[in-house]
């Protein structure tokens, strides 16, 4: 039996143990110590964002976005149904209603041409999700938002180090959110960041993150004591997590380059199968620079995806499908609203397979993955 090809393998640079030891010596273990400050500064530079705050997850950063916008009972946020649950949960937790519109068939990102017609009296924001680290059509979304006085809150969980028209994902809307979960490119186990790109939210973001207090201003010496200012929670990670992340940030360019090389290799290897109309490869618009986060394929509709996934698994290759569209899930039906047809969402989600992709995946594993996939599809063609 050939070697197993795992779907994901978290990449550790090896320097994390050193930075964690440093944090240990520093004797600062709570949040916002020296490593957190280093991470903030580096992320502000890398993401061209005026203020970045580490959070304990992207989910936490998305919840902070809802709190910052003061999303309340019945307020609506327009987003794709084809996303991770946290995009919608953050709104629902505040009593708001996610309004789903369909996605584009090429990038699987929110279809910007459907957003304006979904806007109503209760609409407060548009929440683009940059799927697979490929940017949404942000200029169009920003123009719609401006015209209707809405906020744009980016879920850039998969988008660290990727750009749209040279602008880093997460830094383009009023607020952005990144993830450093171990399944992402740059990781710290569980972790994320809020990108504050609009100065009106800076102070409030610090307060929400620090249990509703102005402790951050107190630490900077701007006030002589800190008190309860507003509603908030504890969204900051401890220093050990920040120390781990710092080691990763120092290698972020190398990590991204490595993943991009593996992504390009799949893209080349899969060209023939696309030419034979067995599948479709990802499409990246010219104005977007992606980050090698994910390689997915869309099977031709004639195939039974479950059989393809099982076939891969029987050959030791762990591939997965992605996102059960939220509007078809129990909580989605209960808390959310659909605007118009979601046929592209339903169709794409039913045909998508993510291939194994991780830092350092050997070329031989990628070749074998494509070979096995190709033979499964060619054989199935005869059967189905
Ligand atoms: C991973 C992911 C999240 C959640 O990130 P966590 O850091 O695990 O909370 C949210 N949205 C999208 C699109 C994601 O891919």
Image (spheres, rainbow, N blue to C red):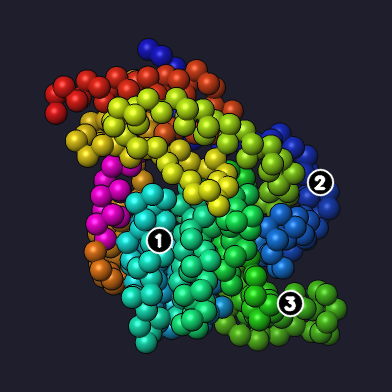
Q: Using the rendered view, name the quadrant where residue 313 is placed.
A: top left
Sequence-wise, the earlier of marks 2 and 1 is: 2
Residue drawn at x 45%, y 38% is: 295
Q: Nearer the viewer, residue 15 or 83?
A: 83
Q: Nearer the viewer, residue 213 or 3?
A: 3
Q: Which residue is mark 3?
A: 215
The local crowd at label 1, few if under 14, some if 14 to 19, many if 20 or more residues have their Cα within 10 Å, is many
Specify whether residue 321 is painted magenta.
no
- The image shows residue 224 at horizontal and vertical percentages of 83, 85
Crowding around mark 3 (Cα neighbors within 10 Å: few <14, some 14 to 19, many 20+) is: many
Tell me the residue that label 1 is attached to: 110
Which residue corresponds to the image point at 83% horizontal and 53% vertical from the top-left?
26
Comparing labels 3 and 1, the label whose residue is closer to the camera: 1
**Which secondary structure, mark 2?**
helix
The majority secondary structure of the magenta stretch comes to helix
CA–CA distance between discs 2 and 1? Answer: 43 Å
Whether disc 2's CB lies below 8 Å from ligand 1 is answered: no
Residue drawn 64% across the image and 78% down it: 201
């Amino acid at each position: 039996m050939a070697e197993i090809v795992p779907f994901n393998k978290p990449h550790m640079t090896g320097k994390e143990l050193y930075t964690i030891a440093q944090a240990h010596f520093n004797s600062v273990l709570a949040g916002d110590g020296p490593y957190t400050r280093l991470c903030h500064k580096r992320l502000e530079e890398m993401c061209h964002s005026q203020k970045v705050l580490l959070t304990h997850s992207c989910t936490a950063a998305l919840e902070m976005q809802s709190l910052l916008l003061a999303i309340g009972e019945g307020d609506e946020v327009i987003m794709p149904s084809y996303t991770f649950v946290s995009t919608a949960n953050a709104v629902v937790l505040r009593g708001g209603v996610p309004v789903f519109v369909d996605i584009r068939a090429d990038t699987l990102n929110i279809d910007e041409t459907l957003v304006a017609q979904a806007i109503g009296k209760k609409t407060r924001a548009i929440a683009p999700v940059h799927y697979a680290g490929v940017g949404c059509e942000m200029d169009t979304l920003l123009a719609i938002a401006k015209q209707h006085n809405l906020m744009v809150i980016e879920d850039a969980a998969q988008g660290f180090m990727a750009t749209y028209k040279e602008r880093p994902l997460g830094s383009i809307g009023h607020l952005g959110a990144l993830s450093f979960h171990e399944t992402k490119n740059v990781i710290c186990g569980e972790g994320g960041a809020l990108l504050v790109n609009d100065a009106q939210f800076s102070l409030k973001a610090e307060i929400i993150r620090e249990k509703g207090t102005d402790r951050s201003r107190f630490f900077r010496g701007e006030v002589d004591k800190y008190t309860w200012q507003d509603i908030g929670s504890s969204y900051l990670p401890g220093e050990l997590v920040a120390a781990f992340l710092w080691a990763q940030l120092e290698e972020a360019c190398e990590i991204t380059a490595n993943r991009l090389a593996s992504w390009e290799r799949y893209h080349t290897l899969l060209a023939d199968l696309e030419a034979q109309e067995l599948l479709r490869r990802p499409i990246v618009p010219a104005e977007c620079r992606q980050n090698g986060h994910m390689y997915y394929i869309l099977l031709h509709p004639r195939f039974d995806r479950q059989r393809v996934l099982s076939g891969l698994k029987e050959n030791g290759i762990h591939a997965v499908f992605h996102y059960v569209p939220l509007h078809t899930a129990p909580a989605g039906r209960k808390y959310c609203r659909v605007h118009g047809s979601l046929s592209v969402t339903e169709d794409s989600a039913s045909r998508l397979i993510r291939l194994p992709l991780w830092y350092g995946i050997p070329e031989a594993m990628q070749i074998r993955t494509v070979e096995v996939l190709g033979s499964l599809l060619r054989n199935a063609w005869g059967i189905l």
